[in-house]
Image (tube, rainbow, N blue to C red):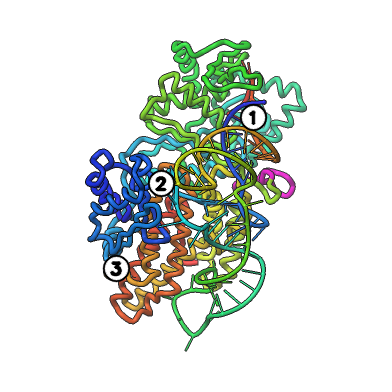
Amino acid sequence: MADPIFALGQRFEAALAAALGAEHAKTDPALRRSVHADYQANVAMALGKRLGRPPREVAQAIVDRLDVADLCTRVELAGPGFINLHLRDETLARELTDLAQDARLGVPSPTPETVVIDYSSPNVAKEMHVGHLRSTVIGDALARTLEALGHRLIRQNHLGDWGTPFGMLIEHLLDRSAESGAGEAGSDAAAAIADLDGFYREARAKFDADPAFAERSRRRVVLLQGGDEATLGLWRRLVATSTRYFSVIYRSLGITLTEQDHAGESRYNPELRGVIEELSGKGLVTESEGALCVFPPGFTGKEGQPLPLIVRKQDGGYGYATTDLAAVRYRLRDLGATRLLYVVGAPQSQHFAMVFEAARQAGWLAPPARAEHVAFGSVLGPDKKMFKTRSGETVKLAALIDEAAERATKVVTEKNPDLDPETTAAVGRAIGIGAVKYADLSSDRIKDYIFDWGRMLAFEGNTAPYLMYAHARIRSIFRKAEGEGESVGAIVVKERPERALALELLRFGTVVSEVGDTLEPHRLCGYLFDLAGAFTSFYEQCPVLKAPEAATRGSRLALCNLTARVLARGLSVLGIEAPERM
RNA sequence: GCGCCCGUAGCUCAGCUGGAUAGAGCAGCGGCCUUCUAAGCCGCGGGUCGCAGGUUCGAAUCCUGCCGGGCGUGCCA
């Protein structure tokens, strides 16, 4: 790993063992970037407390045994026991050289594990809307991040493809087919539900207004659940049509989900009975008010009564608790996952806590396997209420994508009129979509965020366009460099902006690793913003192609190249493109 | 009532699992383009980190209690 923290950490391990005994060797040296030096180690203060010795004395003991002469120019003690480390320029140059030769750009390879990640989860026969944006964008970024770290990812798109609404949807589909005189019932499903929300609304309206239709719908649900082949055929058409539509959205958003990742609620139908039997056999199921319930410990309701996970409703049907339990079991037992991720909105945290607890009780979820609810806040409008269109309707993802591309294309046209129309359109699209995704990823996911075109498309601040611009400027230098016969050379770190850039570049792998642990993509965004800032500062102060000496030009080109690679790789890990020019 | 989450500059947000003087962007003010994309860079001003206790060398960060907001709290997902 290129991050100097790694090499320094090893030296601290040795120093800690030598100074304080082998039992302290693996104490975290708490190495951090510092304003007072390149790095500072805070280990002595914590250790001093634990050992009951003055921290400053502990720090001195560590420093006495710390062998970093080959890496650092200076090691000094400060304050209550800070150990400040100043790296040699040659150390930076050497680590950067390693980084440049590393296809992974310093991203570490932890022990691979099988991770199941559940995200996006739109509803069949409904339009995808902003409500699906965060799960889709955050989930995809995390899947890409964990893959970059070498884990085996199994994406599971938990489609809403089952339930009572399908009775009315199927009946409505039949009515529409009859009206249009189609030969085979439902053969024109694609045409009938081209306008998904319209189709759903019509069905809903008819259901509410027409008792006969409502009754047909209820009977249809029974047929569907009973496995009636003709009904299932119609249901499959609805699912297939929606699925094709989702794929179009995913493709235009640059989401890695494919139809192979689809594992909707219906997938678990055959397993629900068995899940209840297994839970029951373990003594976890209780009958209460006519329903079968699991009462995981630690959850209480309004009157302090235990909260149930209803695994079978009064009417004998199954709800989402049962499906989620079946999914947990399937993912652990059959898919062999040791880490389950659920990228689902924060309001469902209690539900997942209960499902996970029940799964633990059932013995399905046991260490080293663990399950995590990757919760996120809502997308709000400028009024701080749920993001809606001006007329108060939910914002469709398709419309959002189009508007993003349009707005960005307009700006590109203004800012860079020299680009040909095709490039302008492609770049505008990349910027627009990147801006939307980045806005979603760049702040702490647990918090709500306000959807604001102006801010996400701004070219200043922590935005996708700012990062893309930094990348595009570097690529521009290389286009020019080729014409002048210049190419990358040996890296030498000398000037202050070069040092600052170098220190940022070396952090990349550590940051990606942190995102893998914390599942917080905004850390990577913050890092890329710092990197782009360090680069632009360097760019202003250190001429590259105009540098007088060939060696300097070569070194700076190498720095530029590394920066472009890290920016592009970082963005790609987030699921965002980095155009060559803009 | 109980549970979870949030509260940091006028606005939008960071703050690296307890470290040194709390940082960015926007907005305001002032500089920098005969030189690699000025979509940029450099500088200035701006803070009771919701409030009050506690833990300790040290707290925006951890604990407790309040205040304010959001969400959840048995047969929708």
Answer yes or no: are tags 3 and 2 on the same subunit.
yes
What amino acid is labelled 1 in the image? Answer: Leu
**Crowdedness near tag 1: few (<14), some (14–19) or many (≥20) residues, C-alpha within 10 Å:** many
Q: Would you call the spot at circle 3 few (<14 residues within 10 Å), some (14-19), or many (20 or more)?
A: many
Have a look at marks 3 and 1 and say if they share a chain: yes
In the rendered structure, the answer to whether residue A173 lies left or right of residue A35 reads: right
Magenta segment main secondary structure:
loop
Give the residue number, with chain letter if any, for mark 1.
Answer: A169
Numbered label attached to residue A514 = 2
Report the residue at 33% width, 62% height from top: A86
A531 to the left or right of B26: left
Crowding at mark 2 (Cα within 10 Å: few <14, some 14-19, many 20+): some
Of residue A25 and residue B53, the one placed in the foreground of this image is B53
Instruction: Answer left or right for A108 relative to A441.
Output: left
Name the front one of labels 3 and 1: 3
Q: Do the residues labelled 1 and 2 touch (CB within 8 Å)?
A: no
Q: Where is residue A120 in the image (x, y as percent from the top left)?
A: 53, 39
Q: Give the x, y percent position of residue A415.
A: 57, 70
Q: Which mark is residue A491?
A: 3
Q: Please report the bounds of the magenta region as a residue range.
A: A385-398
Choose mark 1 or mark 2, whichever is in front.
2
- Residue A71's tag is none
Against A270, is A77 above or below?
Answer: below
Front residue (pair B22, B53)? B53
Helix, strand or loop for disc 2? helix
Q: Tell me the SS state at disc 3.
A: loop
Say which label, 3 or 1, has the lower sequence index.
1
Judged left or right of residue A422, residue A22 is left
